[in-house]
Amino acid sequence: MKIQLLFFGIATDLVGENSVFIELKSAATISELKKDLLKKYSKLKNIEDFAIAVNEEYGENDLVLQENDVVAIIPPVSGG
Amino acid sequence: MKIQLLFFGIATDLVGENSVFIELKSAATISELKKDLLKKYSKLKNIEDFAIAVNEEYGENDLVLQENDVVAIIPPVSGG
Amino acid sequence: MKKSSVLITPKKLNLQDCYDFVQAASCGGIALFVGTVRNSTKNKEVSLLDFSAYEPMAIKEMQKIADLALTKFQIHKLAIHHAVGELQIGDIPVIIAVSSAHRNAAFEACQFAIDTLKETVPIWKKEHFEDGEVWVNSHP
Amino acid sequence: MKKSSVLITPKKLNLQDCYDFVQAASCGGIALFVGTVRNSTKNKEVSLLDFSAYEPMAIKEMQKIADLALTKFQIHKLAIHHAVGELQIGDIPVIIAVSSAHRNAAFEACQFAIDTLKETVPIWKKEHFEDGEVWVNSHP
């Protein structure tokens, strides 16, 4: 299945992209996606940690992704 | 000895004065003054309580007054 | 450099003035408190408030609060401005502004200043209602 | 009536706008917090900050904070405004304003809102120094 990835903050700089579409196995969870991402974009290991948002809401590790989900890589926030 | 009394807030309304000069026995304390005041201006009993400031500083009951002190009757404050 | 701005005035208080006084390049945060005249108190409708002060002493007491806050909290600057005279609903009797490198100190100092002002500064308000008037806190 | 004003903008934030949104005749106090860009961080001189946001999600998260604050505290209205883009020293990345009948609730809600914003809202700042730049909180 296809999902869209969005990168923000330091993740954009590390990956060199704002947005890409990737293929993922059906019913992948967020923690599976995270492992894939760290393989595909090894520079993401340079961030202490990152959260994942699915369709503009934070998602837990066991959340199951759906076709066409918009998945954002959220490095530690620093607004305010 | 002579001192000046200043009245503020509800005390002005109760006493009908902003400022008066009164004669006081030498070396009177604030607590003695308070008793005198309640006798002289019995309407002051209508205030829950009042503080005394001497020359623009709050004074404790045992403070000894001096000739020409400016003594203010400070009803409960309500600024802000 | 003056670390505090203490003012009692019959003119309208100005939020931006207080902000501008405390703002500084070394500060990451500014906490402000603005008191406003409410339209009711204890379920009675207020028509206006009349503030009076023992001005020279009130200025001294406000300065004491400012000096104490500057000692007690890690803050940069603070402003305490109070209005006197007749104020309508929505008008501003008091503004406190505090700047600091880190925000918690600014919040704490701001609360300390308004709490202490309400306890120690010789300023009084008379509430005017449709059917009379009351000196606040002084009810016989 | 709208109880909250949530905004992300590339324009300069305006303190008076936030004040005017929350001010009401039923309120006795307004607590405000203004974040400002500091000239240094960890003893390094900052030249400018660049804020970026995941805007639609950031707006949702800010709205959640507003809604939660309105439930959690006895407050009347609140505004949460955040700037994005390049900010210079002294510029304002964030303003929070909260009105309430009694001041403690306004202070508590204001602190809650800024504390939570800094934890949950997807906004990032890059600090620019003489000799480079750093994404705050993200240091590898």
Image (cartoon, coloured by chain):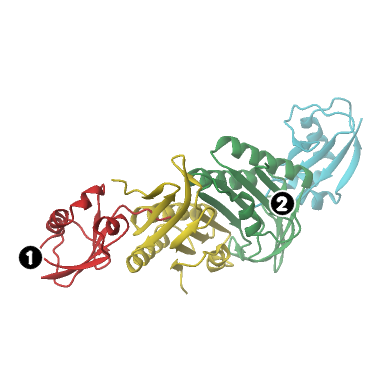
Chain colours: A red, B cyan, C green, D yellow
- On the picture, is B32 further left or further right than C42? right
Q: Chain of mark 2?
A: C
SS at badge 1: loop
x, y percent for residue B25: 89, 28
- Which residue lies under the disc numbered 2? C124
Question: Which residue occupies the extreme left position in the image?
Answer: A25
Regarding residue B5, the answer to whether it shows in the image is yes
- Which residue lies under the disc numbered 1? A25
Question: Which residue occupies the extreme top position in the image?
Answer: B27
Rendered position, D19 above or below C64: below
- On the picture, is C11 further left or further right than C26? right
Q: Quadrant of the N terminus of chain B?
A: top right
Q: Amino acid at mark 2?
A: Trp
- On the picture, is D31 further left or further right than D49? right
Q: Amino acid at mark 1?
A: Lys
Q: Disc number at residue D19?
A: none
Which of the 4 quarters of the picture holds residue A5? bottom left
x, y percent for residue B6: 83, 43
Q: Chain of mark 1?
A: A
SS at badge 2: strand
x, y percent for residue A27: 9, 65
Which of the 4 quarters of the picture holds residue D61? bottom left
For the residue pair C70 and A50, the one nearer the viewer reads as: A50
Regarding residue D94, the answer to whether it shows in the image is no
For the residue pair A9 and C135, the one nearer the viewer reads as: A9
Identify the residue at image location x=14%, y=59%: A33
Whole-number angstrom distance, CA of label 2 to CA of label 1: 72 Å
Identify the residue at image location x=55%, y=67%: D17
Question: Which residue occupies the extreme bottom position in the image?
Answer: D1
Foreground disc of the pair 2, 1: 1
Q: Are marks 2 and 1 in contact (CB under 8 Å)?
A: no
